[in-house]
Amino acid sequence: MKKVLLADDEDGVLALVSATLGNDNRYILITARDGEEALTIARRELPDLIFLDIMMPKMDGYQVCQALKQSPATRQIRIVMLTAMAQDANRERAKAAGADDYFTKPFSPTALLEKVSNLLQLK
């Protein structure tokens, strides 16, 4: 089973991702509600994939991503920015922080499953 960490402070997003991935026996879903919690959990659990909201309390997604990508212990973790911010400038900033991919809200459960499968190469 692959570990997936979702860091988002929106209840609706947490519920949708939990309903989508939480019932799939290929994944263990772990959640965080702010950037500091996400960083702590990622360092402890070493998930295979992280979905990071950009706008979160305490630390934003860019800061979390950059911290994880700069550490030898966590730099191999695949990180996807999960956000409603769809501007090119946001995508470039995410790439500069080390994000592996960018996924915009709103999204469908099918698109989420496809994204996770592709990133973790589960066919």
Image (cartoon, rainbow, N blue to C red):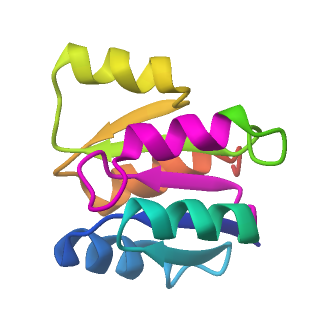
Taking the magenta stretch, the answer to whether it contains residue 84 is no
Rendered location of residue 98, percent (x, y): 56, 26
Residue in the image at 70% along x and 51% along y: 122
Comparing 99 with 59, the one in front is: 59
Is 115 situated above or below 97? below
Residue in the image at 49% along x and 47% along y: 64
Taking the magenta stretch, the answer to whether it contains residue 67 is yes
Comparing 29 with 35, the one in front is: 35
Residue in the image at 40% along x and 37% along y: 62
Rendered location of residue 6, percent (x, y): 45, 65
Rendered location of residue 121, percent (x, y): 71, 44
* Quadrant of the drawing holding the N terminus: bottom right
Rendered location of residue 56, percent (x, y): 27, 57
Comparing 75 with 115, the one in front is: 75
Position of 100 with respect to 36 (left or right) is right
Is 86 situated above or below 3? above
Comparing 92 with 117, the one in front is: 92
Which region is colored magenta?
46-69
